[in-house]
Image (cartoon, rainbow, N blue to C red):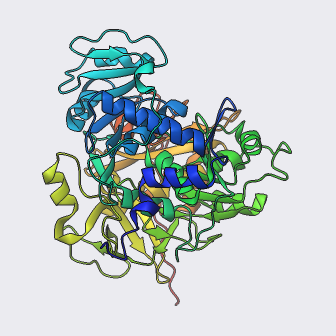
């Protein structure tokens, strides 16, 4: 008998959910793609069954890992669902990976079978492929790879659409996927995620803090992030849980956002980073009027994110999440506190602690650690990384590595990744908070703040920016814009203007590249420009 805190298998396991909707609502559209094609639940069930049977014929067994190296689209969705249909483990790979990081993931996953897009195949020839024995090639001819059997796409199309046999029932605590962290500063870690974990995450992005759903079978969730990222996987699973639909688009695009919303009848979307800012800085074209969009989750919640909801009459939400957890913090609908992530969900405990796991004093910054009263509702470790798992889960709490603070009202605020924190002349600086203020400048599209060495010891602050379309920027004017908006010690010394900030395919800025480049010849230095910023003396009553 399962715990009342663990969802029943028929409510959280992909195979049983897909079989349920294929039986109860076979003509409901599950996925609409960029080219206008669609997959109904009945068709997806048959595809997943045939794919699962084909994978079994290739030697894949329940519990085996299968690599999937495909862009978003029907092939990637089919591969994922076919793998889970037989109780195997879905292991998607970032499509930007190559060289050492690709070899690390292939080695760590330990899969014998991979499903790979033809355009990516040559990259495998440059690495040690270890246990990999068979590759099914999608989107082109299966070019030979030494030591590996390369098979055509037809190898995934079994003649049988009968339900595949499994050695045992698939359980909520079985590993559903291994999602690799971004790896912007070191080797990616493979997050072990159970069906119960993905269920909790899917519920977290489709319900309020008290667990009351705001999405149902009538909704369509736009998926504009890759399926190798929880930003793509979680919305897809949320709508599978609800028996609803997704609109899988290639990527977020400011110019076509509203037309895509209308075309796909999108009612829900997640806007990460500066997406809301991009949309707010765009001139309305009339496509926004009468839009089906009803709910938007903005992460992080900026002033522009709050204004977005008001401008278009859309209910806004915000939360904190990462691959390892399941939306533990969430705000009430239409939050008004900029930069806040919200408060703990029901059943979630959080603490802010120091390096020794001792709780910090009220008002101080500490690492956010989390635990849930529901078994399997978060990750169950990192694949083949026992030391990293033990470190993250020490003392029975999951350690996020993120610095947070909490206000008197109980709102939690993300301060920084600890590795991104800056210390300048005795003061701790949140790169995140500086970035929010810099991005408020009308000429700036997005910003990234990093530390660079100071000749006085500790750090100096460098901000790299990209500009909104048609805009120009005088770095000195930016410094004067920032001066009244932040503490004197937070104002960047250096300003570097780039065409685009370096990013991973999951839209995370690769700050290590900015740190590596440091102060380049084209970087503006306010000290060299003679701009002096000092603290203002406090006025006291006489």
Position of 367 with respect to 24 (left or right) is: left
**Coordinates of residue 510 in the picture (x, y in percent):** 40, 38
| Residue sitting at x 53%, y 49% | 236
Of 466 and 426, which appears nearest the observer? Answer: 466
Residue 425: where, in percent of width, then height? 31, 58
Work out whether 535 lies above or below 541.
above
Expressed as whole percent of the image width and height from the top left, the position of residue 464 reads 48, 40
State whether residue 489 appears in this view: no
Residue 359's quadrant in the figure? bottom left
The residue furthest left is 387
Given residues 127 and 422, the one toward you in this image is 127
Image position, residue 209 (x, y; %): 52, 74
Q: How many labels does the image show?
A: 0
Considering only vertical position in the picture, is 327 above or below 22? below
State the residue in front, 208 or 495. Answer: 208
Q: Nearer the viewer, residue 326 or 66?
A: 66
Q: Is residue 137 above or below residue 299?
A: above
Q: Could you tell whether 84 is left or right of 161 in the image? A: left
**One can see residue 75 in this view:** yes
**Residue in the image at 44% along x and 78% along y:** 346
Q: In which quarter of the image is the N terminus?
A: bottom left
* Residue farthest toward the bottom in the current orientation of the protein: 542
Q: Which residue is drawn at 58% across and 62% down?
A: 484
Q: Residue at x 67, y 32 (%)?
A: 37
């Amino acid at each position: 008998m399962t715990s009342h805190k663990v969802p029943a298998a028929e409510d959280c396991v992909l195979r049983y959910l897909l079989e349920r909707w294929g039986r109860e609502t076979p003509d409901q559209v599950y996925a609409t793609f960029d080219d206008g094609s669609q997959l109904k639940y009945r068709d997806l069930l048959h595809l997943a069954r045939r794919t699962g049977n084909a994978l079994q014929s290739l030697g894949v067994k329940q519990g085996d890992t299968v690599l999937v190296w495909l862009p978003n689209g029907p092939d990637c969705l089919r591969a994922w669902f076919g793998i889970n249909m037989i109780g195997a483990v879905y292991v998607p790979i970032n499509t930007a990976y190559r060289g050492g990081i690709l070899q690390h993931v292939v080695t760590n996953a330990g899969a014998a079978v991979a499903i790979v897009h033809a355009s990516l195949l040559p990259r495998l020839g440059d690495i040690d492929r270890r246990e990999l024995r068979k590759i099914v090639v999608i989107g082109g001819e299966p070019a030979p790879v030494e030591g590996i059997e390369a098979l055509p796409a037809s190898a995934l199309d079994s003649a049988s659409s009968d339900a595949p046999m499994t050695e045992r029932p698939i359980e909520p605590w079985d590993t559903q996927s291994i999602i690799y962290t971004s790896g912007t500063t070191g080797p990616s870690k493979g997050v072990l995620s159970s069906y119960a974990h993905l269920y909790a995450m899917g519920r977290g992005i489709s319900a309020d803090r008290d667990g009351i759903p705001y999405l149902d079978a009538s909704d369509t969730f736009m998926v504009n992030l890759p399926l190798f990222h929880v930003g793509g996987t979680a919305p897809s699973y949320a709508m599978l849980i609800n028996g609803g639909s997704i609109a899988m688009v290639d990527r977020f695009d400011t110019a076509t956002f509203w037309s895509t919303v209308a075309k796909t009848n999108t009612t829900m979307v997640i806007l990460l980073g500066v997406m809301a800012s991009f949309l707010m800085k765009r001139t309305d074209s009339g496509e926004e009027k009468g839009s089906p969009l009803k709910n938007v989750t903005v992460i992080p919640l900026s002033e522009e994110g709050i204004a977005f909801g008001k401008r278009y009459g859309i209910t806004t939400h915000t939360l904190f999440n990462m691959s390892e957890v399941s939306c533990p913090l969430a705000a009430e609908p239409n939050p008004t506190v900029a930069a806040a992530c919200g408060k703990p969900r029901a059943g979630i405990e959080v603490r802010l602690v120091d390096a020794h796991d001792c709780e910090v004093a009220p008002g101080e910054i500490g690492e956010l650690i989390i635990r849930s009263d529901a078994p399997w509702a978060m990750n169950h470790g990192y694949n083949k990384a026992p030391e990293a798992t033990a470190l993250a889960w020490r003392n029975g709490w999951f350690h996020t590595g993120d610095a947070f603070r909490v206000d008197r009202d109980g709102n939690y605020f993300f301060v920084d990744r600890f590795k991104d924190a800056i210390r300048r002349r005795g003061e701790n600086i949140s790169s995140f908070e500086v970035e929010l203020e810099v991005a408020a400048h009308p000429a700036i599209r997005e910003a990234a703040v990093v530390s660079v060495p100071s000749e006085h010891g500790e750090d100096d602050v460098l901000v790299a920016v990209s500009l909104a379309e048609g805009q120009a920027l005088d770095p000195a004017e930016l410094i004067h814009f920032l001066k009244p908006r932040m503490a004197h010690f937070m104002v960047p010394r250096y300003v570097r203007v780039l065409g685009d900030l370096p990013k991973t395919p999951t839209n995370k800025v690769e700050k290590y590249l900015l740190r590596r480049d440091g102060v380049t010849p084209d970087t503006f230095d306010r000290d060299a420009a003679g701009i002096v910023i000092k603290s203002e003396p406090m006025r006291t009553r006489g």
